[in-house]
Amino acid sequence: MTESAAGRDKRKFASAKKMRDIMTSYYIEAKSAKETGKKVAWITSGGPVEPLIAMDIIPVYPENHGAMIGASKMGGNLCEKAGEMGYSDDLCSYARADIACSLVNGGPIGGLPAPDMLICCNNICGTVLKWYEIQARYYKVPLFIFDTPFCHTGYGDEVKRYVRRQIDEYIAFLEESSGKKFDHDRMMEVGKYSVEAQVLWQSVLDTAMTKPSPMTCFDAFFFLALIVTLRGMEVTVDFYRGLLEEMRERVKEGIGAVPRERYRLLWDNLPIWYRIKWLSDIFTAHEACLVADTYTSAWCGQLKYMDEGRFLDSMAEGYTRVYLNIGVDEMIKSVLEMVDKYGVDGFVMHSNRSCKPYSLGQYDIRRAVQEKRGIPSVIIESHMVDDRSFSESQAETRIDAFMEILRESKGKRGA
Amino acid sequence: MDVLDELRKVADNPYGYARRLKGEGRAVIGYFCSYTPEEIIFAAGAHSMRLFGTHGEISRADAHLQAYCCSVVRGALEEALSGELNFLEGAVFPHTCDSIQRLSDIWRLTTRFKFFADVVLPVKLTTESSRMYMVEVLERFARELESAFGAGITGEKYLDSIRTFNKLRAGMADLYRLRSARPGIVSGSDFLAVVKAAMSMERRACADMITRLAGELGKKGPSSNAGGGKRIMLAGGVCDHPDVYRLIEESGGVVVWDDLCTGTRAFEGMIREGGNPLEAITERYMTRLACPAKHRSLTERGERLVRDAKEHKVRGVIFLLLKFCDPHDFDYPYLKESLDREGIPSMLVELEHQLPPEGQLRTRFETFMHTI
Ligand code: SF4
Ligand code: SF4
């Protein structure tokens, strides 16, 4: 039974167009920075962007660009180019695609605007350090490294002091690179917007607790762009307020993102950017909704450490204790919480060759989830942006087998 | 027995050696990286031993780590799970790359050694705040060792330890100079044995032996091989394969210098013998040539590589990179370009815990030697 056109329309998000518009004008502004005399800073996805916004410096995210490259299926070509430049195919494909793109101005938007400065926060991986070193050599611009020590088991006082000191160094760096004075009042305001946007984003994700869920993680992958790139701006707060309303409306009307939602799944790791639609269709055909994921919640998971009244101080801890900068046991705890919170029946793990800090440790997380909650899981392997070696048939076979197990186990539990 | 023989014996069977040490009551602590502050471990009365991972099959580790993780990490976990490393009191994990970072977690959660420590050093080594942070991290580590091994580390113990490591490193520096001045004075595989012994043997005895070895070799006449092979420099990460050195020699090369984890990067730099010992150890880390997982400069590694290659008059550079090693893989294109600009030829060999068929490697080395 296929869905009627009216049913499909009902499922479309009005906010999607709004977001595309905001992103388009953002990229236009960034690309015309030379003419408007604004400075451009490239920054890593987990980096503290708020001081940039407060300084009116345009933040640009190579990782978001990498996702766009992947989604427009241009990753394979660019990664091939990176291979010719000497970069191993085993490296992160965000980094490879971006490095190659700088040389050829390729990709869906003809390359990113050249940076005036680079801000690298290593709270997500060691890859970004190497990647930004390469770009600092290429563009010959200053590089600021915001070093967030890995928190295997806790957050020691020495870490706290070190990260806090770096916030002052960061501000001094921005003042020097932009020739402007840092405005602390403006910072307070930006901090408020940032926290507010994160609260709203969390509330948006929380609507997926409803059965049927008004959204899937594929929607979250899409709507994530603003919280990553423009948190700290008023337009972002407004946007997420609108999106939240739209979600609540759906909840009220009982509109599910997947028609006839029977299974609720949790996604782990970054998206496979070049197969989002394909994966979404497969799961929809199985009447399975990916209600939550460990990735998009990374942009609000630190709320417990944030205090908008002491934004800069609390930001130090918030940015250091992100999901990718904590031990595997802490990750297991987070995953179990999500399983319970969203009423998850099965676990889909993307073993992402591009991202070692995210993927190594997955087998232990999988075992823990299986033991503690008794839910089945499946592992799909890919290189999130480099589509040259992705095997559709293997992924599909695995998903089918997994759904078969899920059907049986859920049948037994009589749900 | 001659000194070289003794060092070779340790390098051939480091675990057998470690078991004997343990039998004598010495706690053995495994480590994986040159950023391990061994001086503190020694001062605490324990023994540090570098682990390279198995050269055998990897199966148990497959339950925890994907195949796209480097073989040092997979191989070490394999040995920890198989019981091969039961002589260890525990292990210490300085923070370097993303793979070691996760190995630390998995190790902590799945093995049952008595001692475990993370030493989360700063990644950037350029600022006063990172220096202060590093000192504090080392202080924490020292306290952990003290409480594990029940004794306070006195200033005297620190000084003795720093002197021992300085002596060892000075001896290694002499050996490196000798090898460059008189290539072939020790074969490549023997040199690797000395390097490995310097990472596994009781350090006081080892420092003595290496000093003696350098003295003896210094007195010997020029080696028979002098002027024979083409002068080669190795660059990259870990290479624990004596056969690689043999094959290079059999193909007409002779290794005169290196920039390897199992080489100069582990021995470079002396520690100040006075003042606060932890600050002195920190100073060495902040100033020695950085590994690619740390940040000291944007251009230093390339400049150093070119400078060393010129200073030691090498004909070519062989990059030995471990497959799936992100930090080294990211630096490779830029390092190669630095060499290209100066007209210094180079080749790249990807290694894993087991070598590719010998013939294949030999052909590649021979081809390279012909072109340089
Ligand atoms: S995908 Fe993973 S390795 Fe790549 S930049 Fe992001 S966190 Fe780093
Ligand atoms: S630095 Fe490279 S070889 Fe060493 S553990 Fe990390 S990935 Fe493996």
Image: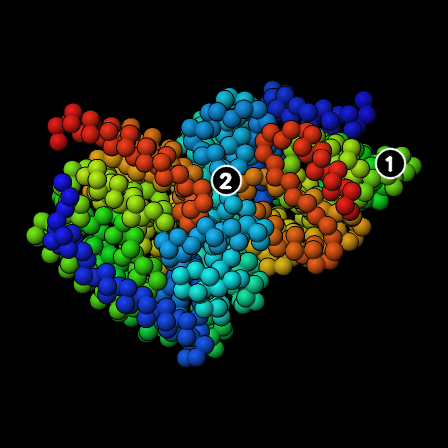
Q: Which x, y percent locates residue A203?
A: 20, 54
Q: How is the image coloured?
A: rainbow
Could you tell me which quadrant the N terminus of chain A lies in? top left
Depth order, front residue of B137/A67: A67
Q: Which x, y percent locates residue A173?
A: 48, 69
Q: Do marks 2 and 1 share a chain?
A: yes
Residue placed under numbered mark 2 in the picture: B100
In this picture, residue B228 sits left or right of residue A215: right
Q: Is residue B255 above or below residue B189?
A: below
Q: What's the chain of the residue with tag 1?
A: B
Q: Which x, y percent locates residue B12?
A: 68, 25
**Crowd around label 1: few <14 · some 14–19 · many ≥20 (10 Å):** some
Q: What's the chain of the residue with tag 2?
A: B
Q: Is mark 2 within 8 Å of ligand 2?
A: yes
Quarter occupied by residue B55: top right
Residue at position x 54%, y 34% from top?
B71
Q: Is residue A309 above or below residue B153?
A: below
Residue at position x 61%, y 39% from top?
B350
- Which of the two labelled residues, at mark 2 and mark 1, occupies the earlier sequence position? 2
Residue placed under numbered mark 1 in the picture: B225
In this picture, residue A232 sits left or right of residue B39: left
Q: Amino acid at mark 1?
A: Asn
In this picture, residue B166 sits left or right of residue B228: left
Judged from the image, the secondary structure of the residue bearing numbered disc 2 is helix
